Amino acid sequence: MNQEQNLRQCAACGEQEAFFTYAVRKNKNLRRLCTDCLLREHRNLFCPICLDVPPPEESIVCLNCPSITHLDCPPRPSSSASPFTCPPCSEPNFSFFPKSSHSTVLDQESADALVAAAIISAFLMNNEAAELKKEAHKKIFAAKEAKRRAKEALANLQDLVLKQKSFGDEE
């Protein structure tokens, strides 16, 4: 598989010709996900009904996953005791975005899914960049401290050599 094909393959579902792929990190590994898989893996970051990002403040949580939905979005249950189940949990073949869509025309729902996935991907990569920056600052501080200790050790060694030399000259 060449480099360009690899950039278009989804790491989660294996889709070879994903319409778009997004770079995201999981467990310190960079992966490329198609729109559908990115949205499925990060259902807690948006409303899966209206695809609004960020997730709603006044919300209902899915019974089976961390999906968070606006109070106004889910279909009204027939009884108030009915729990909410998001579309991916309630429909086995549900897809946020069609696989291998070779059409250049997108419907509004697919366009909304693309926008939500792009926002989520940018959010995740910005968080990762901030974490990497923190880690780099820690390493810089550790390197400066190691350099300071090494200079101190060299100064102590130089003092010992000079003392030993002067002690040897006295004999």
Image: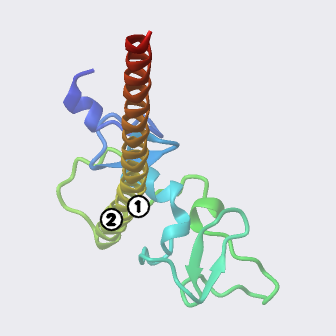
Which amino acid does the dot numbered 2 rest on?
Answer: Ser
Image coords of residue 53 (percent x, y) = 41, 76
Q: Can you tell which mark lies on residue 127?
A: 1
SS at badge 1? helix
Question: Looking at the image, how many numbered discs can be counted on the residues?
Answer: 2
Horizontal side of residue 48 vs 107, given as left or right: right
Residue 101 visible (yes or no): yes
Image coords of residue 3 (percent x, y) = 22, 27
Residue 98 visible (yes or no): no
In the orientation shown, which residue stands out farthest toward the right? Answer: 81
Which amino acid does the dot numbered 1 rest on?
Answer: Asn
For the C terminus, the quadrant is top left
In the orientation shown, which residue stands out farthest toward the front? Answer: 170
Of the numbered discs 1 and 2, the one sitting upstream in the chain is 2
Image quadrant assignment for residue 155:
top left
Image coords of residue 54 (percent x, y) = 44, 77
Above or below — where is 56 with respect to 140?
below
* Label 1 crowd (10 A; few <14 / some 14-19 / many >=20): few
Above or below — where is 168 with respect to 80?
above
Give the Cα separation between the discs numbered 1 and 2.
Answer: 26 Å
Residue identified by numbered label 2: 110
For the N terminus, the quadrant is top left
Image quadrant assignment for residue 129:
bottom left
Residue shown at 38% from the left, 53% from the top: 137
* Label 2 crowd (10 A; few <14 / some 14-19 / many >=20): some
Residue shown at 19% from the left, 61% from the top: 105
